[in-house]
Structure formats: structure tokens, C-alpha cells
Image (cartoon, rainbow, N blue to C red):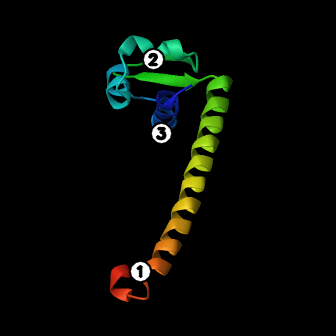
């Protein structure tokens, strides 16, 4: 799995009525690669758009990818907070820096 998988699953969770062309453009991937991921069970052609349905594996993968992304970002946030506090101590009490 890569970043494209999470983007795909997020886009489909927000709007499962995107056309293949719209979806591939948003994700920056080819039209043919969309269904090869095996996280989408069907692509139903409707009047002017397609409706994608995630498989149970697709839903599970979206949750796992989201959790991993959130953990990574929370870890980054904690490190940045510590760096900011350290820099504040180094530069002293000049409050104009923090306005």
C-alpha cells in the first residue's frame, strides 16, 4: 500500500460518484490502475457517472492507513512542540516573536 491507496479511499469515502476520469485526475494515476488495487468491488456505470463501492478489505485498509497516518502526524506534532519549546528557551522572553 502507498499514499495513492489512502488518497483513493478518502476520495471514494467523500464522493463515490466521481467519474473515473475525475478520480484519476484527483489522484494523479491512470484510469486503468484504479480497479487493479483490489480495494474496490464494483464500478457501476450510472447515467453520467460511476459509483464505486469499497470492499471490506478496502474499508479495513482505509482505517489502517488513516490510523498509521494519524500516528505519524501526532508523533511529528509532539517533536515539533518540543523543538518549539527548546527554541523559545534559547531565544529568551522576546514576546514579539510569538505574535
Which of disc 2 and disc 3 is earlier in sequence?
3
Which of disc 3 and disc 1 is earlier in sequence?
3
Q: Residue at x 50, y 23 (%)?
A: 52
Q: Closer to the camera: disc 3 or disc 2?
A: 2
Q: Residue at x 47, y 29 (%)?
A: 8
Disc 2 from disc 1: Cα separation: 51 Å
- The image shows residue 36 at horizontal and vertical percentages of 51, 12
- Residue behind mark 3: 14
86 w.r.t. 6: above or below: below
State the quadrant of the C terminus. bottom left
Tell whether label 3 touches label 1 (CB within 8 Å): no
The secondary element bearing badge 2 is classed as: loop
- Residue behind mark 2: 34
Nearest the viewer among 93 and 11 is: 93
- The image shows residue 59 at horizontal and vertical percentages of 63, 31
Which of disc 1 and disc 2 is earlier in sequence?
2
Q: Closer to the camera: disc 1 or disc 3?
A: 1
The secondary element bearing badge 3 is classed as: helix
The quarter holding residue 68 reads top right
55 w.r.t. 12: above or below: above
Q: Closer to the camera: disc 2 or disc 1?
A: 1
Q: Residue at x 68, y 25 (%)?
A: 56
In the shown orientation, is residue 86 left or right of residue 67?
Answer: left
- The image shows residue 49 at horizontal and vertical percentages of 37, 22
- Residue behind mark 1: 91
The secondary element bearing badge 1 is classed as: helix
- The image shows residue 84 at horizontal and vertical percentages of 48, 70
Disc 1 from disc 3: Cα separation: 44 Å
Amino acid at each position: 500500500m502507498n499514499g495513492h491507496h489512502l488518497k483513493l479511499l478518502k476520495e471514494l469515502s467523500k464522493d463515490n460518484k466521481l467519474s473515473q476520469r475525475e478520480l484519476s485526475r484527483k489522484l494523479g494515476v491512470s484510469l486503468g490502475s484504479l480497479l487493479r488495487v483490489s480495494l474496490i468491488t464494483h464500478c457501476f456505470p450510472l447515467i453520467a457517472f460511476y459509483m464505486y463501492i469499497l470492499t471490506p478489505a478496502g474499508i479495513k485498509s482505509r482505517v489502517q492507513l488513516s490510523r498509521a497516518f494519524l500516528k505519524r502526524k501526532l508523533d511529528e506534532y509532539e517533536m515539533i512542540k518540543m523543538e518549539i519549546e527548546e527554541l523559545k528557551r534559547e531565544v529568551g522572553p522576546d514576546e514579539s516573536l510569538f505574535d
